[in-house]
Amino acid sequence: MHVGVLTGGGDCPGLNAVIRAAVRTGERRHGMRFTGFRRGWRGVLEGETVALDGRATGGILHRGGTILGSSRTNPFSRQGGPEGVRDALAANGLDALIAIGGEDTLGVANRLHGELGLPVIGVPKTIDNDLSGTDYTFGFWTAVQIAVDAIDRLHTTAESHDRVLVVEVMGRHAGWIALESGLAGGADAILIPEVPASVARVAAHVQARADRGLGFSIIVVSEGVELAATGSDGPVDEFGHSLLAKRGVGEALAERLSEATGRECRAVVLGHVQRGGTPIAYDRTLATRFGQHAAEMVAAGRWGRMAALRGAEVVDVPLAEAVGTLKTVPASAYSEAEVLFG
């Protein structure tokens, strides 16, 4: 079989490990050949390909980013885009396509399979861990660890200067990174998109600490918390997502906390540093297992499905299950964390 591979959406640590494992497993167990598409669905539509084999994927297990590049191109937002994908697979002599991506990339894959009958399977990738159908996605725990390392360092400078530091982390619609990094880093308050933000309540935590002689605080906030709205009429990407404002929620929250408490508050935006660099061991292993399972799904012809982690096992589930609803932080998980605030 001749198999295509693409990576779409935002990059995250572990993508290269998936590519490596899928190629090696497919070649060695099933005699497959692989062709990579550069820059996600854009590369499919524009014919940007690269041969993938054991040599091309050697030495990439530990590397962050993706050797194939990525984009946020949506074939369904372009005239003739879906048919263009179908024609590209035929023109390259491909028997199957492995799409590695998040809700948007896998949503396209699901529609291509359902509406055009294309032989597509998915591998879940999202730094935010907000894909349904899988317990965890690779890259998430690396992002959490990067955030925790930053919080640990910020604790010492905040304490030295009696400052309130607001740490903005990734998480547009789901607050998993903020919740896990805030808990592990000992944050004094955590704000996530799933729970309405209250500046007054955060200010009360800061003041309670000051009353106990603790003049510093660490506040962790997800980038998608609606404190500084981007506006519904602002620019959007090809999937219809509003682009986040240049002045994010971290800076807005720091400013409003300063006004509410009279204390010095500063914002630290971790941004894309959470996406970059070497994946931790767990994410390398999970990504490898996903890549191996993807190759086995191709060999078995299990189209329209996605590799997924359920407990300790890697299984596969329908793509429709993964992209149907976002996996957000449940109220019970936030309630458990909230008792530790202040």
Image: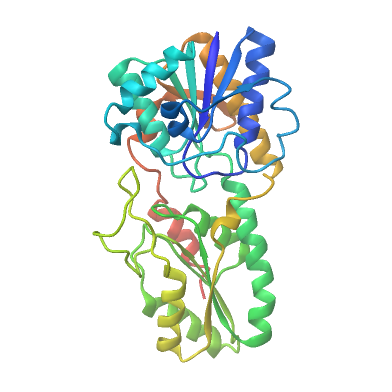
Rendered location of residue 120, percent (x, y): 43, 20
Q: Is residue 188 left or right of residue 53?
A: left
Q: Answer whether residue 59 is visible to the viewer in this image.
A: yes
Residue 184: give x, y in percent of width and height.
61, 60
Q: Quick one: 145 or 299, which is closer to the camera?
A: 299
Instruction: Determine whether, in the image, residue 2 is placed left or right of residue 248.
Output: right
Residue 130, by quadrant, is top left
Say which of 253 and 176 sits in front: 253
| Residue 133 visible, this angle | no
Which residue occupies 44% across, 24% down? Answer: 317
Q: Quadrant of residue 36?
A: top right
The image quadrant where one finds the N terminus is top right
Left or right of residue 331: residue 60:
right
Examine the rendered structure and indicate whether residue 103 appears above or below residue 120. Answer: below
Given the current orientation, which residue lies at the most extreme left position? 233
**Location of residue 92 in the rendering, given as x and y in whole percent from the top left corner:** 49, 14
| Color theme of the render | rainbow
Q: Residue drawn at (58%, 33%), measured in percent from left and top?
A: 68
- Does 252 sit above or below residue 241? below
In-front residue for pair 1/78: 78
